[in-house]
């Protein structure tokens, strides 16, 4: 059998043949009496042509595994020494299925059929053979019988040992898997294990890590009850991946919870976070949306640092988008954030989310948000059901290339028997000191109509009296007393036009004031104060209702 027609196409044949002729050069000779610096031309011995190389000897000595089969049933014509060392002697003339069972075991025989039919070479990378080593197989069509009788088509199988590369790649993949598992574990541990449950909101949230280590880390959400019936809602996304992004996220989430206790407006919270993000890592930025829900106002007051718009579906099914105002991401510095608002009355549903839910490589971001709006318009059920439906509609899978955080909140419309558990009453405090007895009478009448126990009734009237007296003494008009009950607590709140926040202090025996806030803090389950957008303040306290 003549191999010379296709031997020149063997991988590396020409390179190795040329390397063996590089040293066949005669030594330089200096002509007698010539200048020592002058050199004579080198004399090169002509190299044999490629067609004259002993191909059988070359194939027997190459370290790669070589086999030649011919015919439609791939009868074995030749294997080289390296192949014999790897798999033992192979009977020539037999079909490959019997003569080369190792190729059948790794599924290479269909590839031989394909190469024979198409006449084009094919390569399969890093297949593990029965001898435990990994090989890259190149199957090349050849024409046999050159220069002799017979003739026909065959396939040359050339296998390169890539075991070291395959093991290194597997070690790298294992390392990436461990890093991803570490990032996912850290990420999940830093997210809230259980969401706080406000009285007036029903909330569900979902976090889905991306399919690779590079797609994990940075997304977070949180729910923070502020007291007085108000709730803070947070969602953010650190612009990074892996353990580092998850660590930065954890620091920002902790800071948000601490700043939220100051009961500041949303844009003031983002202003504080912006400075902190620069201190954590000047090269790390993050987007964040911070919103506050007050059931008395029926709206969501929010501020956004480069984050995607909040979506709200009202009771009639119309979806609104909270586009403005939006400032730059956290960590950029030098920007004054602003707060906006969007209606969120009874029967409304809001969605806060990260870009992994709506951003796709082949789509504009606005198209993804518009698709989410359509999905939200048709989604009904509990917050968790809506959350799952939005994730499915976005096509998020386990192999998704970015992590996803979604939070859905509903402000239920309380009707029927449930409506008796959620009540509001308010009184404008007009006039001077005579407003105090009117406030006590109003509070007593309201709490009686709400059928509170005598002890809770008396505590509520006392708290209302002390808060009103404190406002009359230290505040300015307009003043208002508001009583509110939920299925879990009674809330007493007084607002006025002065922005000086009260503080609890120890009153000396001779002091005529300073005891009101101390009394309220002692009898109430919780109390607090905050500045209101109009320049005044609100002082509140709450009592936990007895179960049943």
Image: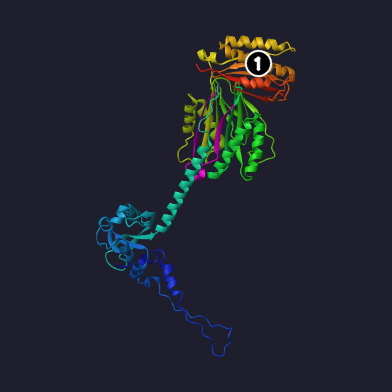
Residue at 74% from the left image edge and 12% from the top image edge: 433
Image height check: is 254 above or below 534?
A: below
Single out the residue that lies furthest toward the bottom: 33
Quadrant that contains the N terminus: bottom left
Q: Position of residue 396 (x, y in %)?
A: 47, 36
Q: Position of residue 30 (x, y in %)?
A: 53, 86
Numbered circles on residues, count:
1
**Residue 19 visible in the shown view:** yes
308 falls in the magenta region: no
Q: Is residue 148 left or right of residue 49?
A: left
Q: Which residues are magenta?
A: 200-225
Q: Position of residue 430 (x, y in %)?
A: 72, 12
**Residue 401 visible in the shown view:** no
Single out the residue that lies furthest toward the front: 509
206 falls in the magenta region: yes
Image height check: is 492 above or below 308?
A: above
Residue at 27% from the left image edge and 62% from the top image edge: 90
Image height check: is 355 above or below 60?
A: above
Q: Is residue 548 left or right of residue 124?
A: right
Please say which color scheme the image uses.
Answer: rainbow
Residue at 51% from the left image edge and 38% from the top image edge: 189
Q: Position of residue 372 (x, y in %)?
A: 52, 31
Q: Quadrant of residue 346?
A: top right
Q: Which residue is more in the foreground, 248 or 86?
A: 248
Q: Which residue is more in the foreground, 259 or 411?
A: 259
Q: Assign a secondary structure to mark 1.
A: helix
Q: Residues within 10 Å of mark 1 (few under 14, many from 20)?
A: many
Q: Which residue is mark 1?
A: 464
């Amino acid at each position: 059998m003549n191999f010379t027609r296709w031997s020149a196409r063997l991988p590396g044949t020409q390179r190795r043949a040329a390397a063996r002729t590089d040293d066949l050069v005669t030594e330089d000779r200096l002509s007698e009496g010539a200048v020592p610096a002058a050199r004579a031309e080198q004399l090169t011995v002509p190299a044999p042509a490629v067609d004259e190389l002993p191909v059988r000897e070359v194939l027997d000595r190459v370290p790669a595994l070589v086999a030649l089969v011919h015919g439609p049933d791939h009868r074995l014509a030749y294997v080289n020494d390296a192949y014999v060392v790897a798999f033992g002697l192979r009977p020539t003339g037999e079909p490959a299925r019997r003569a080369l069972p190792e190729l059948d075991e790794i599924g290479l025989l269909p590839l031989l059929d394909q190469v024979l039919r198409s006449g084009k070479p094919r390569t399969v990378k890093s297949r593990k053979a029965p001898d435990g080593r990994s090989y890259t197989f190149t199957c090349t069509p050849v024409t046999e019988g050159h220069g002799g009788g017979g003739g026909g088509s065959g396939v040359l199988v050339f296998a390169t040992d890539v075991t070291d590369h395959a093991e290194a790649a597997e070690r790298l993949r294992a390392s990436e898997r461990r890093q991803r598992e570490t990032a996912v574990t850290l990420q999940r541990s830093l997210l809230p294990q259980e969401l706080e449950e406000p009285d007036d909101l029903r909330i569900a949230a979902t976090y889905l890590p991306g399919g690779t280590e590079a797609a994990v880390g940075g997304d977070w959400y949180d729910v923070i009850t502020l007291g007085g019936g108000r709730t803070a809602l947070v969602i953010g996304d650190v612009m990074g991946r892996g353990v580092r992004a998850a660590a930065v996220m954890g620091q920002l989430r902790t800071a948000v919870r601490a700043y939220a206790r100051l009961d500041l407006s949303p844009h003031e919270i983002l202003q504080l976070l912006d400075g902190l993000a620069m201190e954590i890592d000047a090269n790390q930025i993050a987007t964040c949306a911070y919103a506050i829900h007050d059931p008395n106002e029926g709206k969501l007051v929010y501020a956004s640092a480069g984050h995607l718009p909040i979506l709200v579906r009202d009771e009639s099914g119309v979806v609104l988008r909270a586009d403005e105002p939006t400032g730059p991401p956290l960590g950029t510095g030098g920007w004054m954030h602003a707060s906006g608002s969007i209606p969120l009355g009874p029967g409304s549903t809001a969605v806060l989310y990260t870009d992994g839910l709506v951003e796709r490589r082949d789509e504009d971001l606005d198209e993804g948000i518009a698709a989410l709006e359509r999905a939200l318009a048709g989604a009904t059920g509990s917050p968790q059901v809506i959350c799952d439906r939005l994730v499915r509609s976005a096509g998020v899978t386990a192999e998704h290339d970015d992590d996803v955080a979604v939070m859905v909140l509903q402000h239920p419309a309380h009707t029927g028997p449930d409506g008796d558990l959620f009540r509001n009453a308010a009184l404008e405090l007009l006039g001077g000191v005579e407003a105090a007895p009117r406030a006590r009478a109003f509070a007593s009448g309201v709490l009686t109509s709400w059928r509170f126990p005598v002890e809770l009734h008396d505590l509520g009237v006392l708290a209302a009296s002390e808060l009103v007296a404190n406002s009359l003494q230290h505040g300015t008009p307009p003043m208002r007393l508001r009583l509110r009950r939920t299925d879990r607590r009674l809330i007493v709140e007084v607002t006025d036009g002065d922005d000086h926040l009260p503080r609890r202090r120890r009153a000396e025996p001779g002091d005529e004031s300073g005891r009101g806030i101390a009394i309220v803090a002692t009898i109430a389950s919780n109390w607090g104060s905050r500045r209101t957008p109009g320049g005044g303040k609100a002082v509140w306290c709450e009592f936990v209702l007895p179960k049943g």
